[in-house]
Amino acid sequence: MRVVLSGGGTGGHIYPALAIAKQCGAEYPDSEFLYIGGERGLESSLVPKENIPFKAINITGFRRKLSFDNVKTIVRFVKGVRTSKRLLREFKPDVVIGTGGYVCGPVVYAAAKLGIPSIIHEQNAVPGLTNRFLSKYVSTVAVSFEGSGAAFPAAKKILYTGNPRATTVFEADKNKGYASLGLPPNSPIVLIVGGSRGAKVINEAMIDMAPFISKLGHISFIYVTGESYYETTKSAIAAKLGEIPGNLRVLPYVHNMPEVLACTSLIVNRAGASFLAEITALGIPSILIPSPNVTNNHQEKNARSLETSGAAEVILEPQLNGGKLFAAVERIMTEASLHGKMSAAARKLGKPESAHLIVEEMRRLVRSQGKR
């Protein structure tokens, strides 16, 4: 298959696209790819590292209040559609996939106008503006949360696939995760992460919680602070306690997160859609601290969907402190029946076959055009 991928702005849009490409390449080794992204988006650095050809267009998102910048955005969108049509005619894809972010708007819209089969994938429980716009033009809307297709009333077809990032993590080697952390296999691990760049409020809770963790000496705590918070967080813990506890590792970043997740017993994190797909595929119980600084408060809605199913506990930022966080960790990690129930509930929500389901739909659309 010849496939054009588009999506960007954040890793939550980019990594699902890369997971689709990986799965498609595994199932159809002769596949060829082109990724069309933004000039300044994170995708411009991440995608070339995966040896996928990359082309950039100049596009910006709409502001949610009246602004002259929105007029400029419309002009850029029109130019982006024109550029996308040229790139699509040159590459001649069999199918086009958009995974969210405003950059995929002109790309997927151009594909629809050229009669090229197209799919958009929505990671969140509450869809973004771009995907809502594109839903009436594309061949298929793939959703990560069961029942969230109702947000796309004009869609031709809704397909519940889960998030393709789940497939990447489900196939990870947990023994490599233990080895990278310097821990023996089957060690119980509590992983606390504030997102890829860290989160000030979560790092403050890490510092506040540090004096309590020696009560659970048999459990290894991994604090992943984000590069910008690493030195201050580590220094604050050392200053508070005199030294870093033996069962605590403070890290600035984890480069092999799928492998580390595969060996994790409990995770504390934000509630981004790709992350939730990863932990449910692995059946990891979670304590979720949704970011309040996102569009439509979608992280809290994502988190509540897991909480309702019994897979997670939710702590909102205003209620977060080290004592409350440790109490939740201690309860889940010391009550085996609770941990087991949460793990089973998470696994029930997981879709480790997600990337395959999307590739299967891609193939169906290609065949419907009379191509093999």
Image (spheres, helix red, strand yellow):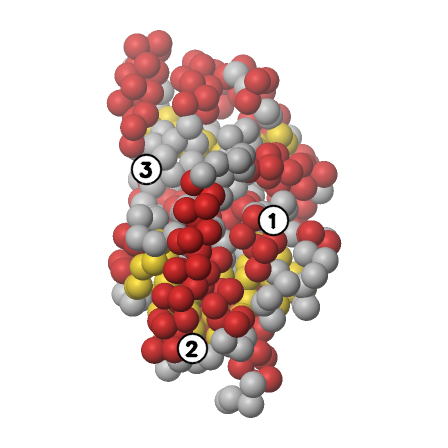
Image disc number at residue 190? none
| Quadrant holding the N terminus | bottom left
Kind of residue indicated by mark 2: Pro
Location of residue 206 in the rendering, given as x and y in whole percent from the top left corner: 43, 21
User: 183 and 205: which one is in front?
Assistant: 205
Image disc number at residue 127? 1
Location of residue 76 in the rendering, given as x and y in whole percent from the top left corner: 40, 53
**Figure check: 328 above or below 254:** above
Label 3 belongs to which residue?
253
Question: Can you tell which quarter of the image residue 242 is in?
Answer: top left
| Circle 2 crowding by C-alpha within 10 Å: few under 14, some 14–19, many from 20 | many
Location of residue 45 in the rendering, given as x and y in whole percent from the top left corner: 28, 52
Q: Which of marks 3 and 1 is nearer the N terminus?
A: 1
**Figure check: 142 above or below 241:** below
Residue 185 in sight here:
no
Secondary structure under tag 2 reads loop
**Disc 3 from disc 1: Cα separation:** 29 Å
Q: Which residue is drawn at 49% across and 23% down?
A: 216
Question: Can you tell which quarter of the image residue 276 is in?
Answer: top right
Secondary structure under tag 1 reads loop
Q: How many marks?
A: 3
User: 60 and 176: which one is in front?
Assistant: 60
Q: Which of marks 3 and 1 is in front?
A: 1
User: 253 and 94: which one is in front?
Assistant: 94
Using residue 257 as the reference point, say whether residue 308 is left or right of it: right
User: 161 and 53: which one is in front?
Assistant: 53
Kind of residue indicated by mark 1: Pro
Q: Which of marks 3 and 2 is in front?
A: 2
Q: Which of marks 2 and 1 is nearer the N terminus?
A: 2
Label 2 belongs to which residue?
93
Secondary structure under tag 3 reads loop
Q: Residue at x 27, y 60 (%)?
A: 48
